């Protein structure tokens, strides 16, 4: 999948942009990479070296009026131009600003996949307007674990608790997909969880994948079965 990556430079910290781009690459090929902001402003100076290192094109957008964000309009106009050019299959909007909610909705209406990346302060309307939403804090946590001398070290500050609400969400999703014996294919469960709650991510709870997350909750039962098409094992889950 070819992806257009549009970054709100006024609204996103420059740290961990390399890790953000690596995260985006998991979902497709970022063929268009642009960042928007007023590059005459001193607070964007940290970005300049990082843009060269990650081949991101800076788009100059002057702040015409104090207190008004002209960057949003420039991003939205460019996104629509890219949409009509039909050069990409998906978009990644990197911002914590709810002003992009309608843009995400419009791009999905056009059949494009929309991935959002932003901080935990991102308003919920923008999160649910995306197909998938990834927190920058989770990307940062993963990078800190890689750089740590002890790979078991975890950045506790950004790990959510597995609440009864989360368990209920998983349980109802399993029920939605289960066969007569109550079993559901875990891959399908993960896909439906993403549709129900775009910011659902096993890494939010300290697990790399969905399987160990499910395994840690004693209300679910896992079963590994031989794939009829190969040597791989298929994982199924049901409510106990």
Image: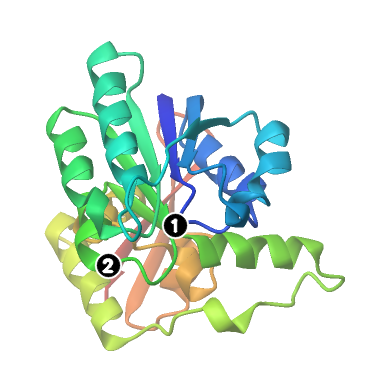
Would residue 23 be found to the left or right of residue 219 on screen? right
User: Which residue is at a point 68% across and 52% down the rendered structure image?
Assistant: 46
Q: How is the image coloured?
A: rainbow
Would residue 231 be found to the left or right of residue 186 on screen? right
Q: Is residue 192 visible?
A: no
Label 1, on which residue? 11
Q: Earlier in the sequence, mark 2 or mark 1?
A: 1
Label 2, on which residue? 123
Task: Give the x, y percent position of residue 8.
Answer: 43, 47
Task: Give the x, y percent position of residue 31.
Answer: 49, 21
Is 89 situated above or below 135? above
Which quadrant of the rendered structure holds the N terminus?
A: top left
User: Which residue is at a point 33% across and 61% down the rendered structure image?
Assistant: 67
CB under 8 Å between discs 2 and 1: no
Element on which disc 2 rests: loop
User: Which residue is at a point 40% across and 80% down the rendered structure image?
Assistant: 217
Q: Among all residues in the image, which is located at the extreme front?
A: 65
């Amino acid at each position: 999948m070819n992806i257009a990556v549009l970054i709100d430079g006024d609204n996103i910290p420059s740290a961990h942009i390399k890790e953000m781009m690596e995260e985006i690459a998991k979902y497709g090929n970022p063929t268009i990479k642009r960042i928007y902001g007023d590059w005459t402003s001193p607070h964007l100076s940290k970005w300049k070296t990082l843009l060269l290192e990650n081949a991101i094109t800076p788009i100059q957008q002057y702040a015409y009026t104090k207190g008004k964000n002209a960057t949003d309009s420039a991003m939205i106009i460019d996104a629509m131009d890219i949409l009509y050019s039909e050069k990409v299959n998906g978009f990644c909007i990197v911002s914590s600003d709810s002003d992009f909610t309608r843009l995400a909705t419009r791009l999905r209406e056009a059949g494009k996949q929309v991935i959002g990346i932003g901080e935990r302060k991102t308003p919920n309307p923008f999160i649910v307007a995306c197909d998938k939403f990834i927190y920058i804090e989770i990307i940062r946590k993963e990078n800190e674990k890689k750089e740590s001398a002890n790979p078991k070290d975890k950045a506790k500050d950004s790990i959510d608790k597995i609440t009864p609400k989360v368990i209920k969400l998983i349980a109802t999703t399993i029920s939605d997909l289960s066969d007569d014996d109550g079993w559901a294919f875990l891959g399908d469960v993960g896909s439906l969880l993403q549709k129900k709650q775009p910011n659902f991510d096993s890494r939010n709870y300290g697990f790399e994948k969905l399987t160990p997350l499910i395994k840690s909750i004693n209300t679910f039962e896992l079963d590994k079965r031989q794939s009829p098409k190969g040597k791989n094992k298929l994982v199924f889950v049901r409510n106990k």
